[in-house]
Image (cartoon, helix red, strand yellow):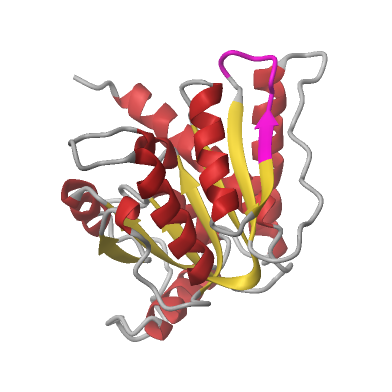
Amino acid sequence: VVLPSTISRMIDVQSKMAERALELLCLPEGQSCYLLDIGCGTGLSGDYLTEEGHCWVGIDISPAMLDAALDRETEGDLLLGDMGQGIPFRPGSFDGCISISAVQWLCNANKKSDIPAKRLYCFFSSLYSALVRGARAVLQLYPENSEQLELITTQATRAGFTGGVVVDYPNSAKAKKFYLCLFSGPSASLPKGLSASEDGEEATESKFTKARVVHGLARRGMLKKSREWVLEKKARRRRQGKEVRPDTQYTGRKRRPRF
């Protein structure tokens, strides 16, 4: 049995990593972008992208995960697919890409026909094509060892990407995170990894995340669940072609508790 506190912590960690990945994408300030979320799972990372005003498409190999995302009414478009067989989108479709804890699975051979190097190259070459030239992909991953990380980066380079690995909190066994930052255009300077303050790694990571969340909401001058927030969400869903109830004077109004 998974305790509610454990689930809550998992959601919090996922949101933090999605936030960091979005930061490393270095997207234009105040501009809504069209993003790809690889290994989207139940849509937790996508929820953060939506909160930041972006539209997104998620791809995952698990039907159960995508069903859970649909049950949660996540706002992104969802696609069932194996990233090791390539990203099935037209060239130049996306302004950027994020992935949380997914790419390392391509290093495993689940059947005799699976060759990790070939699956990684197929993934990276199709991803390179699907991105707008000059766009970035930020892939958070958990490599088992240095050889696995080298295999991943080598295939990314073969596919045309430049970039490298950003390591946050390298001296912490618990907070250490790897982000593969890939550039689909001319090589750019690699962002610096986060480091620990004198008070410790976890406090620094928590402080960073909290400041970013407040800033993200305040930047658009609205609070989550407020009338403005609800109206923007409904407008975004209409642009995606989804059925949305008409706006009324009661839209976004808080309901009184029922007894």
- Is residue 84 found left or right of 208 in the rendered image? left
| 168 in magenta | yes
Query: In this rendering, is residue 49 above or below 129?
Result: above
Q: Is residue 256 visible?
A: no
Q: Residue at x 46, y 43 (%)?
A: 100
Quadrant of the image containing the N terminus:
top left
The percent position of residue 221, horizontal first and vertical second, equals: 68, 66
Query: In this rendering, is residue 69 above or below 152?
Result: below
**Foreground: 113 or 90?**
113
**Foreground: 67 or 168?**
168
Q: Residue at x 48, y 60 (%)?
A: 125
- Is residue 112 found left or right of 24 in the rendered image? left
Picture quadrant of residue 112: top left
| 16 in magenta | no
Q: Is residue 97 visible?
A: yes
The percent position of residue 161, horizontal first and vertical second, equals: 62, 56
| Prevalent SS, magenta region | loop
The magenta stretch spans which residues?
A: 165-174
Q: Residue at x 68, y 64 (%)?
A: 27
The percent position of residue 169, horizontal first and vertical second, equals: 69, 23
Query: In this rendering, is residue 65 above or below 3?
Result: below
Q: Residue at x 34, y 53 (%)?
A: 83
The percent position of residue 37, horizontal first and vertical second, equals: 44, 57
